[in-house]
């Protein structure tokens, strides 16, 4: 009887966890699609090769610690919105 209750409880929590994960991914996906980074080393604009690099990067306001695709140095890069002609 106790096992049955635990299973019911898990079934109620699961959609909440899935919802929270989706709610966390959507803003990151938006950032990945609409924003690019300015490398602090070479000052060139770049986009990370993968969405997951952008998602799991250390985050400090408008800056993220990502690897530049031009000079390959890992540094704090400034987040900037893509201009209309680039998107
Ligand atoms: Zn660079």
Image (cartoon, rainbow, N blue to C red):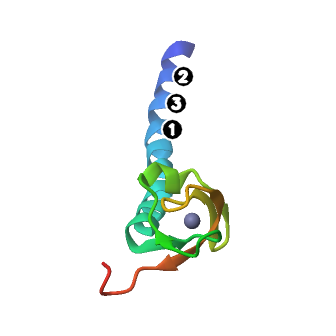
Of the image marks 2 and 1, the number of the one nearer the N terminus: 2
> Which quarter of the picture shows residue 75?
bottom right
Label 2 beta carbon within 8 A of ligand 1: no
User: Which labelled disc corresponds to residue 9?
Assistant: 3
Q: Residues within 10 Å of mark 3 (few under 14, many from 20)?
A: few
**54, above or below 34, in the image:** above
- For residue 22, say whether it is visible: no
- The residue pinned by badge 2 equals 6
Where is residue 86 shown, x and y percent of the image? Answer: 32, 80
- Residue beneath the point at 47% across and 57% down: 23
The quarter holding residue 15 reads: top left
- Does dot 3 land on a helix, a strand or a loop? helix
x and y percentages locating residue 32 in the rendered image: 43, 64
The local secondary structure at tag 1 comes to helix
Q: CA distance from mark 3 to mark 2?
A: 5 Å
Task: Compute the Cα span from label 1 to label 3.
Answer: 6 Å
In contact (CB < 8 Å): disc 1 and disc 3: yes
Residues under numbered marks 3 and 2 in contact, where contact means CB atoms less than 8 Å apart = yes
The residue mark sitting in front, 1 or 3, is: 1
Seen at 37% across and 67% down, the residue is 33
For residue 13, the mark is 1
């Amino acid at each position: 009887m106790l096992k049955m209750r635990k299973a019911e409880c898990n079934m109620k929590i699961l959609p909440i966890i899935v919802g929270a994960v989706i709610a966390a991914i959507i803003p990151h996906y938006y950032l990945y699609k609409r924003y690019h980074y300015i490398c602090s080393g070479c000052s060139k604009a770049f986009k990370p090769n993968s969405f997951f690099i952008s998602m799991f990067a250390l985050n400090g306001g408008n800056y993220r610690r990502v690897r530049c695709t031009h000079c390959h140095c890992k540094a704090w890069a400034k987040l900037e919105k893509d201009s209309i002609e680039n998107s």
